[in-house]
Image: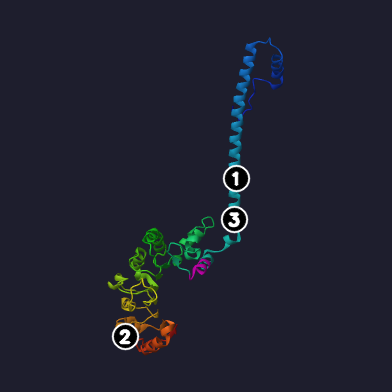
């Protein structure tokens, strides 16, 4: 029963007063001559009271559960309100932006089956919803602009990662991209990044061959590209790759390119087709130890093909 005035539960008044009903029950138990109708009536009253008490207990338990839930919710709100006064809340967005950029700098978002946490830092930061970091991280295009596609033999991995890569490209907006491509265009992930080649600012590519990157040979330009690194493997190192001299001519339309790092230079006639060589100011060549001295001698003779060179390094 609910009170019409306050809405609270009215205590149920039992039909059987426990102190009064005990006497007739005890009397009936000690005697063979008792009124069956009286005993039946008392039993009905007791059972009715039991049902009513069960109902009232159920209502009180529901009420208690409701009050506990409300208390838990208020406790949560209290903690959230206290967090608003935390020192980190006083940091301006500009400072948080610099912190996030410093944390993620040098750690590309890596699209592979197994990646350490450092390989997807922007996604980790964007998952911290309660701190207000999420929107800040999402709104920093540079955090989503450093992307790497490792070599992968399982094509099913690529299909799972296409959506996250598209999300990165959307969040990067029109910001220049740094890309690391360790696979060819047979990978749909690589194809997505090749479509964005006009936004490339820094590119690292393994096995730069026309057969691996046919789209690059279709007249693409690289108006923002400043640094290019190619990793070309020797035939005895990795049998699964297609080998030959790196096709630097694929980047002949790169007006800002000034730095080249490679494991191998193409022959002089092919090198001349690489027109940005005239604007290269920094050249770095990494040789295999076994032929370091020989290739170093050969490459020194080719330096005249880079007329504006200011610095060059030869490493083994």
In magenta segment, residue 176? no
Q: Which residue is mark 1?
A: 72
* Dot 3: element: helix
Q: Say which residue label 2 marks.
A: 268
Q: Measuring from the top left, give residue 170's x and y in whole percent.
A: 39, 62
Residue 102 shown in magenta? yes
- Identify the residue position indicated by label 3 in the image: 83
Report helix, strand or loop for mark 1: helix
Q: Is residue 56 visible?
A: yes
Q: Nearer the viewer, mark 2 or mark 1?
A: 2
Q: In the figure, 308 relative to 139: above or below? A: below
Task: State the CA–CA distance, disc 2 to disc 3.
Answer: 65 Å
Query: Residue 12 occupies which quadrant of the picture?
Result: top right
| Nearer-N-terminus badge (3/1) | 1
Question: Could you tell which of marks 2 and 1 lies nearer the N-terminus?
Answer: 1
Q: Residue furthest left?
A: 218
Q: Position of residue 263 (x, y in %)?
A: 40, 79
Query: Horizontal and vertical percent for residue 216?
Result: 31, 72
User: Is 254 displayed left or right of 145 in the figure?
Assistant: left
Q: Identify the residue shown where x is 37% and y is 70%.
A: 199
Classify the position of the N terminus by image quarter.
top right
Gap in angstroms between the C-alphas marked 2 and 1? 75 Å
Q: Tell me how far mark 3 sits from mark 1, CA to CA.
A: 17 Å
Query: What residue span does the magenta drawing correspond to?
Result: 99-106
* Closer to the eye: label 2 or 3: 2
Residue at point 35% right, 89% down?
A: 304
Query: Which of the labelled discs sits on residue 124, or is there none?
Result: none
Image vertical order of residue 189 relative to residue 77, above or below: below
Point out residue 48 in the picture as x, y percentages from the top left corner: 60, 21
Bin the neighbour count of mark 2 within 10 Å (Cα to Cα): few under 14, some 14-19, many 20 and up: few
Camera-side residue: 33 or 129?
33
């Amino acid at each position: 029963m609910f009170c019409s005035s306050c809405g609270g539960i009215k205590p149920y008044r039992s039909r059987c007063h426990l102190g009064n009903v005990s006497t007739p029950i005890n009397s009936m138990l000690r005697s063979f001559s008792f009124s069956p109708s009286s005993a039946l009536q008392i039993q009905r009253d007791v059972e009715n009271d039991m049902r009513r008490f069960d109902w009232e207990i159920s209502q009180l338990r529901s009420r208690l559960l409701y009050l506990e839930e409300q208390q838990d919710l208020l406790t949560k709100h209290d903690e959230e309100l206290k967090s608003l006064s935390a020192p980190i809340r006083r940091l301006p967005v500009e400072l948080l932006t610099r912190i996030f950029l410093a944390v993620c700098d040098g750690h590309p978002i890596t699209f592979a089956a197994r990646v350490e946490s450092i390989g997807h830092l922007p996604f980790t930061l964007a998952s911290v919803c309660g701190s207000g970091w999420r929107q800040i991280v999402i709104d920093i295009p540079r955090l989503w602009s450093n992307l790497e596609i490792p070599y992968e033999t399982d094509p099913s991995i690529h299909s799972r990662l296409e959506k996250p890569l598209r999300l990165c490209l959307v969040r990067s907006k029109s910001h220049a991209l740094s890309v690391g491509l360790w696979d060819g265009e047979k990978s749909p992930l690589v194809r997505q990044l090749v479509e964005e080649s006009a936004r490339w600012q820094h590119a690292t590519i393994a096995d730069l061959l026309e057969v691996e990157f046919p789209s690059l040979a279709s007249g693409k330009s690289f108006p923002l590209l400043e640094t290019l690194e190619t990793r070309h493997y020797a035939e005895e190192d990795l049998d699964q790759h297609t080998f030959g001299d790196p096709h630097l001519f694929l980047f002949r339309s790169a007006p800002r390119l000034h730095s080249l790092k490679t494991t191998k230079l193409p022959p002089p006639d092919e090198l001349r087709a690489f027109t940005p060589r005239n604007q290269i100011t920094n050249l770095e060549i990494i040789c295999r130890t076994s032929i370091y001295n020989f290739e170093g001698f050969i490459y020194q003779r080719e330096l005249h093909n880079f007329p504006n060179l200011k610095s060059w390094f030869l490493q083994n």
